[in-house]
Image: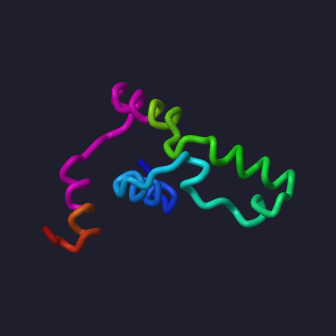
Amino acid sequence: MQITPRSLLARELSASGKAQSKAEALPQPAAAAAGDGALASAAAGLQALPEVDLSRVAEVKQALARGEVQFDAQRLADLVARYHGGRE
């Protein structure tokens, strides 16, 4: 899952019980709010897209299953620990 300011805001709103419809809860781009037709249409299209590229996830899963991609769990664990500064 990709974490974005939009997903964080939606999570906070739903956790606080203040969840509204998706369109009401998430901030709208200023230009789209101003009524620019083409830009508003593009912004609406972007908001309709999922945050995760499910087709890409499926491709990676298939590549892993076929053995085309090597997965090193220890390397991943080391990178996560290094990223978080070794904090527990």
Q: Residue furthest left?
A: 88
Whether 63 is drawn above or below 25: the answer is above
Q: Nearer the viewer, residue 76 or 22?
A: 22
User: Which segment is the magenta one?
Assistant: 60-78
Furthest residue toward bottom: 85
Residue 8 lies in the magenta stretch: no
Indicate whether residue 77 is drawn in magenta. yes
Horizontal side of 71 relative to 63 (left or right) equals left
Q: Is residue 41 above or below residue 28?
A: above
The residue nearer to you, when weighing 1 against 31, is 31
Task: Farthest residue to the right: give it.
Answer: 37
Q: Main secondary structure of the magenta part?
A: helix
Seen from the viewer's position, the closer of residues 19 and 9 is: 19
Which residue is at 69% across, 62% downward?
29
User: Across the whole image, how many numbered discs are drawn on residues?
Assistant: 0
Based on the displayed image, in which of its 4 quarters is residue 71 positioned? top left
The residue shown at (55%, 46%) is 21
Q: Measured from the top left, where is residue 68 in percent x and y?
A: 39, 33
Residue at position x 61%, y 41% from top?
Answer: 49
Residue 88: percent from the left, percent from the top?
13, 67
- Looking at the image, is 61 positioned above or below residue 45? above
Q: Is residue 4 above or below residue 62?
A: below
- Which colour style is shown? rainbow
Nearer-the-camera pick, 55 or 25: 25
Return the x and y of residue 13 as percentages of the image width and height: 42, 56
Rendered location of residue 62, percent (x, y): 41, 27
